[in-house]
Image (tube, helix red, strand yellow):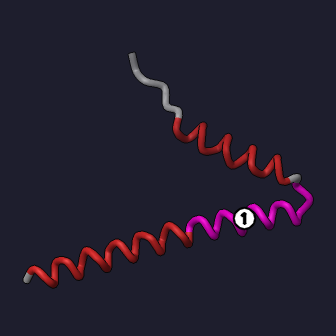
Amino acid sequence: MNTSNSRFLIDFIILYSTLKVQRAFVKLVGWEQLTTQGVPRWQVHKRVAGGSQRRGSVASPV
């Protein structure tokens, strides 16, 4: 019983890491597509950074 639990945990970790790599790759491909469309690379990075900052900042109810 213990080996099946550890096997499940290992499978879950592998799946999770694979999904993280896929997500990073999709982001990278998106950046490359924007740069080939003529958007300057610094502006692409600024957009991505600005989007993540806006998503993270939430006004706290006081």
Image mark count: 1
* Circle 1: residue type: Gly
Image quadrant where one finds the N terminus: bottom left
Q: Which residues are magenta?
A: 23-39
Q: Residue at x 10, y 80 (%)?
A: 2
Nearest the camera: 34 or 10?
Answer: 10
Q: Residue furthest right?
A: 38
Q: Residue furthest top?
A: 62
Looking at the image, which is closer to me, 34 or 61? 34
Residue 56 location, x and y as percent?
52, 38
**Numbered disc 1: secondary structure:** helix
- The part of the image, by quadrant, that contains residue 37 is bottom right
Tell me which residue sits at (56%, 67%) in the image. 23
Quarter of the image with the C terminus in it: top left
33 and 17: which is toward the camera: 17
16 or 57: nearer the eye?
16
Instruction: Estimate the x, y position of residue 54 in percent, counting from the top left.
Output: 60, 37
- Check residue 38 for magenta coloring: yes
* Drawn side of residue 20 relative to residue 61, left or right: right
Q: Taken as a whole, is the magenta stretch helix, strand or loop?
A: helix
Left-right relation of 60 to 1: right
**Apparent side of residue 3 relative to residue 31 in the rendered image (left or right):** left
Q: Position of residue 49 (x, y in %)?
A: 67, 44
Residue at 83%, 53% in the rendered image:
41
Residue at the image point whose x is 72% and y is 65% from the top: 30
Residue 34 is one of the magenta-drawn residues: yes
Question: Eyeballing the image, is 17 above or below 11?
Answer: above
Image quadrant assignment for residue 24: bottom right
Q: Residues within 10 Å of mark 1 (few under 14, many from 20)?
A: few
Q: Is residue 43 above or below residue 16?
A: above
Mark 1 lies on residue: 30
